[in-house]
Amino acid sequence: MLENAIKDLLYKIADDQLILGHRNSEWTGFGPMLEEDIAFSSMAQDKLGHSLAFYTLLHQMGEGDPDTVAFMRNADQFHNSQLVELPIGEYDFSLIRHFLYDNAEILRFESLSQSTNEEIAKIATKLKGEVRYHVLHANTLVKQLGSATQESISRLQQSLEYALPFALGIFEPSKHEQELIDAGIYSGEAALQNQWLERISAVLEKTHLKLPEIANLQPVYGGRYGQHTEHLQPLLDEMAEVFKIDPTAEW
Amino acid sequence: MYGGGNVFEATKFDDLEQEDPVKLAEFEARIARGEKIEPSDWMPQLYRKQLIRMIEQHAHSEIIGALPEGTWITRAPGFRRKLAQMAKVQDEVGHAQLLYSAAETLGKTREQMLTDLINGKSKYSNVFNYPAFTWADSNIISWLIDAGAIVNQMANAKGSYGPYCRALDRICAEEAFHLKYGHDAVVHMATGSPIQRKMIQEALNRWWPPIMTFFGPSDKMSMHTETLMRWKVKMASNDACRQQFLDMYVPKIWELGLTVPDPKLRKNEEGVWEYTEPDWDEFKRVINGDGPCNAERLAVRRTAEERGAWVRRALLAPKATYVRPLA
């Protein structure tokens, strides 16, 4: 049924944005320079806002209200890719994750802005303008740090190699893939992944970083089906710590 | 978020005697006329020193102040609060950025200032050495500490140093939103479930003593203070700021059915607030490093600086393009 397929698609987008927004917000007060503190915090707010937009649409389609859906589910009910739930680590990892993720997200939003589903197209059109700035930020810093010092280049290279299999997990196909493509909802994960590879390759070519051979990598799948690393549940527990003191209260 | 007070350098006053008396007179006349002093203008060394010290402490207070509230970003209950808490703390970091830039116009680099912060050489607002135990503590900070900061900053925005005043104008506009946010959050707690009301009252009990010290001890009226006021570096006395704060916010706290944990607090017939004198010995002890969170705050800052050093080194690295000398 197309409605279930659409809900599945919206959940993975919303969950990705919520969890990555949460992670990015952890940089507030800890960035390598004030400007990056502010940038990560600003992107975190956008991501959170995007997840809210999609949860709100899901709510209109009969799902729970956004606060309940975001704050009361357990890890196995989340559909985010495992990439976004990994701890922020050092700045090089957070930057590379941001680079890999946002270059994928902009393509997803571009594709969704052409969707036959008008509601989705409307939201995606609005949000892709914001994601464009996130991409610009990531690409600028990857270009700079990816060709600056030996130290920065090797840090980024290591993080790139570590994050890439997880990033491929963004494109884990769902069981509704063909149905969504046939209905013109979006272009499908395989098509997005190919475009994404072109985009990130073009940026990395301008640096001293080397993109590992994708064919040799084992993508980290499972996130879209509720399988997660040990890092997601503690994140969710922390996120809901106050909310769960009294879920019926107005905070 | 900065309360000012207490923090001016005890400079040897004969410093002033070495200044050119004609230039000094002209400088003072300009300030008396309400003109702003700009970075390239002549100014006495003492003025420069005190301003660097003040703006730097203000900037440090913003980034250190981001920590107690920052810990609640990841735990804020519900989308509305989570988004607002993020934006609020981000603003504070943005204020630090503005203020470090303002201080840099006086000749001290951001890197030097941050080094002095980490080494414990320069201070920040003492209240941030206290912990935010619960979400409610974070709400009290957003409301009442920001309220106190506005009282102080509105006064300082009328000071004499152009770059600092302009930064403060922008900062005050944002702080006004924080105040609304903090008030709204406290209202929800104070009118919410019994658990919420208990949480917010306990947070107020914890934060009241630090709030009362926020503006610093009564000023010793010395020649030093007089000069700083004449130069419009210090714009209002610590006690005046404290009175203004009490006048504006105690009625609002009472309106919410909350109790201020000071049995002596009352407005007397002359319209002056009376209160239990804060524990200034504790204040001194905490500002000199022996508070509940001093070590933790600086450790966090130090870790952030050290972990991020490679990024700053890389961004400052010269481009690897060299021109071969012709001969």
Image: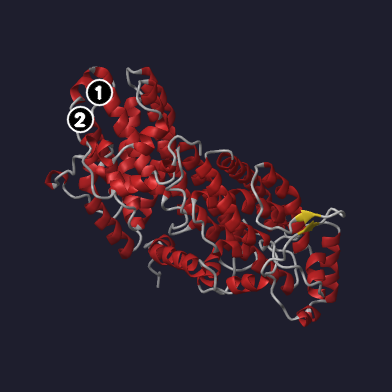
Asked if the residues shown at circle 2 and circle 1 are in contact, with their CB atoms under 8 angstroms apart, the answer is: yes
Split into 4 quadrants, where in the image is the C terminus of chain B?
A: bottom left
Measuring 87% from the left and 55% from the top, which residue is drawn there?
A: B270
In the image, B161 versus A28, the foreground residue is: A28
In the image, A238 versus B84, the foreground residue is: A238
Measuring 59% from the left and 65% from the top, which residue is drawn there?
A: B124
Q: Residue A198 vs residue B155: left or right?
A: left
Dot 2 crowding, Cα within 10 Å, few <14, some 14–19, many 20+: some
Q: Amino acid at mark 2?
A: Ser
Measuring 40% from the left and 42% from the top, which residue is drawn there?
A: A244
Q: How many marks?
A: 2
Q: Is residue A18 above or below residue B288?
A: above
The label on residue A174 is: 2
Protein chain holding label 2: A
Please provide percent x and percent y for residue A69.
Answer: 36, 33
Please provide percent x and percent y for residue B240.
Answer: 78, 59
Q: Secondary structure at mark 1?
A: helix
Please provide percent x and percent y for residue B247.
Answer: 76, 50
Q: Secondary structure at mark 2?
A: loop
**Residue assigned mark 1:** A5
